[in-house]
């Protein structure tokens, strides 16, 4: 089945630092790739997505590029803020077959940004 | 915007109790999912449903069952709660994109 491996956390950064959270996946066919964010006490929100190779998803200053050759979807932000402190999940979804689009998640990376 | 509502934010139950977690959506989405979230393990799929009265096992269905009598409601049932089912439970729907509820934190004592 599909699987996702995320960079181990927690990650602690100072405000305005550069962020990278690594994500690699294994999946058959042509999956879609996602980053979700969970702020303290809340449910998951879609941060960005990419549906085909070389697509770049972006939102709120975060970016990730779908790299089929390296099966990766690393999350980056040039200058983090305290408000970016959250748990970040990488996920893969196969829309075809009998999976009905189910998401397979990585283990999550806790990000803490200090002023 | 689609709204996915989980009936309880926090729940405390005793070992051996039968527990119902409810999830209701306000749109006509066919696909609904139940995940559990545990630190260091991410989210793992318990069950999903692609239509009324239809259900499919996810990756960790043991100890759980589900019910989908109406399109808008998808219930997760713990037949006999155990302490290892203490977790955060998240419901989601899918139509062109996923929408998650805010979760139910269940503690089994």
Image: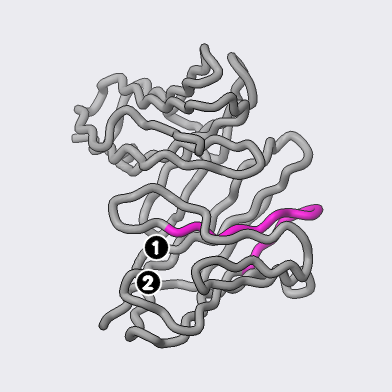
Rendered position, B95 above or below B15: below
Residue shown at the point (50%, 68%) measured from the top left? A60
Q: Secondary structure at mark 1?
A: strand
Q: Earlier in the sequence, mark 1 or mark 2?
A: 1
| Marks 1,2: beta carbons within 8 A | yes
| Magenta span contains residue B45 | no
Give the image's coloring scheme.
one colour
Tell me where residue B25 appears, x and y as whole percent: 48, 28
What is the spatial separation of the Cα atoms under label 1 and label 2, in whole angstroms?
6 Å
Report crowding for label 1: few under 14, some 14 to 19, many 20 or more residues within 10 A (C-alpha). many
Residue shown at the point (58%, 24%) measured from the top left? B28
Residue A85 horizontal side relative to residue A75, left or right: left
Report crowding for label 2: few under 14, some 14 to 19, many 20 or more residues within 10 A (C-alpha). some
Q: Which mark is residue A87?
A: 1
Dot 2 corresponds to which residue? A111
Q: Quadrant of residue A24?
A: bottom right
Stretch of the chain drawn in magenta: A24-37
Q: Quadrant of residue A3?
A: bottom right
Residue A86 horizontal side relative to residue A59, left or right: left
Q: How many marks?
A: 2
Rendered position, B64 above or below A104: above
Q: Chain of mark 2?
A: A
Q: Quadrant of the C terminus of chain B?
A: top left
Q: Quadrant of residue B107?
A: top left
Q: Main secondary structure of the magenta part?
A: strand
Return the residue nearer the eye: A59 or A31: A59
Q: Which mark is residue B78?
A: none
Rendered position, A42 above or below B22: below
């Amino acid at each position: 089945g599909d699987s996702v491996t995320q960079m181990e956390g927690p990650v602690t950064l100072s405000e305005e630092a550069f962020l990278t959270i690594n994500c690699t996946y294994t999946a058959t066919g042509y999956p879609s790739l996602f980053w979700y964010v969970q702020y303290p006490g809340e449910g998951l929100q879609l941060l960005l997505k990419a549906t085909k190779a070389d697509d770049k998803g972006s939102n709120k200053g975060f970016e990730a590029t779908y790299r089929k050759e390296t099966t990766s979807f690393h999350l980056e932000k040039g200058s983090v803020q305290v408000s970016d402190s959250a748990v970040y999940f990488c996920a893969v979804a196969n829309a075809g077959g009998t999976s009905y689009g189910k998401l397979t998640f990585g283990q999550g990376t806790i990000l803490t940004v200090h002023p | 915007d689609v709204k996915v509502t989980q009936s309880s934010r926090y729940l405390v139950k005793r070992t051996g109790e039968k527990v119902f977690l409810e999830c209701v959506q306000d749109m006509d989405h066919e696909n609904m999912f139940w995940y559990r979230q545990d630190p260091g393990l991410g989210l793992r799929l318990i069950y999903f449903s692609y239509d009324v009265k239809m259900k499919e096992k996810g990756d960790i269905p043991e100890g759980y069952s589900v019910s989908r009598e109406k399109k808008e409601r998808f219930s997760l049932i713990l037949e006999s709660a155990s302490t290892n089912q203490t977790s955060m439970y998240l419901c989601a729907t899918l139509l062109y994109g996923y929408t998650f509820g805010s979760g139910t934190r269940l503690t089994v004592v």
